[in-house]
């Protein structure tokens, strides 16, 4: 196993642990929280994979895939991927999509858990 890939798995594992800890405060079986955990882990892994592919100069993960998973609920994984991996930080569309995805899912969380 290469050094870079082990770091990626370590970060993904830490993120998974954090998300499971947060999810434990909500009712067991909550579908939305489970969905967010899964999409965030997947989105972070996609960002890490794209970063690795960029360094190797091989076929990349299409940007629309990163946008789609961020909008589907992987906004935290996307932000972590941008911050920890320093990936896609110069691209304005990523900040726009991530901001929209964050606002959208915070609104959904407010509706579900706070009845707003």
Image: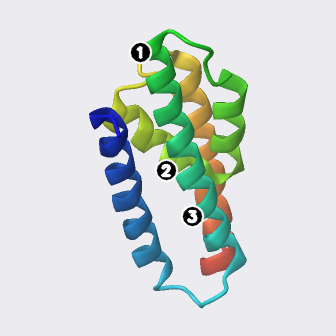
- The crowding category of the residue bearing disc 2, from other C-alpha atoms within 10 Å (few below 14, some 14 to 19, many at least 20), is many
Kindly report the distance in space between the C-alpha atoms of the residues bearing marks 2 and 3: 9 Å
Left or right: 75 in relation to 69: left
Residue labelled with disc 1: 55
Kindly report the distance in space between the C-alpha atoms of the residues bearing marks 1 and 3: 27 Å
The quadrant in which the C terminus is found is: bottom right
Instruction: Classify 114 as above or below 58.
Output: below
Kindly report the distance in space between the C-alpha atoms of the residues bearing marks 2 and 1: 23 Å
Q: Are marks 2 and 3 in contact (CB under 8 Å)?
A: no
Judge depth for marks 1 and 3 and give the one in front.
1
- The crowding category of the residue bearing disc 1, from other C-alpha atoms within 10 Å (few below 14, some 14 to 19, many at least 20), is few
The residue positioned farthest toward the front in the image shown: 1
Residue 35: give x, y in percent of width and height: 67, 65
Residue shown at the point (40%, 43%) measured from the top left: 80
Left or right: 38 in relation to 3: right
Which comes sooner in the sequence, label 2 or label 1? 1
Residue 113: give x, y in percent of width and height: 61, 79
Which comes sooner in the sequence, label 1 or label 3? 3
Residue 71 placement: quadrant: top right
Badge 1 marks a residue whose secondary structure is helix
In this view of the protein, which residue sits in the foreground, 89 or 55?
55
Protein image colouring = rainbow
The residue positioned farthest toward the top in the image shown: 57
Q: Are marks 1 and 3 in contact (CB under 8 Å)?
A: no
Residue shown at the point (63%, 33%) measured from the top left: 66
Residue shown at the point (45%, 14%) measured from the top left: 56
In this view of the protein, which residue sits in the foreground, 111 or 46?
46
Residue labelled with disc 3: 37
Residue shown at the point (37%, 38%) measured from the top left: 5
Left or right: 8 in relation to 59: left
- The crowding category of the residue bearing disc 3, from other C-alpha atoms within 10 Å (few below 14, some 14 to 19, many at least 20), is many
Residue labelled with disc 2: 76
């Amino acid at each position: 196993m290469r050094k870079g890939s082990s770091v990626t798995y370590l970060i993904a594992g830490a993120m998974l642990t954090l998300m499971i800890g947060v999810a434990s405060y909500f009712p067991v079986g909550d579908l939305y929280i489970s969905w967010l955990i899964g999409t965030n882990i997947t989105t972070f892994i996609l960002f890490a994979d794209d970063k690795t592919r960029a360094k190797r100069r091989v076929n990349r993960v299409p940007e629309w895939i990163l946008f789609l998973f961020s909008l589907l609920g992987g906004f935290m994984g996307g932000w972590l991927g941008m911050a920890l991996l320093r990936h896609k930080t110069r691209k304005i569309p990523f900040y726009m999509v991530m901001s929209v995805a964050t606002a959208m899912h915070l609104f959904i969380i407010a509706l579900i858990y706070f009845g707003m």
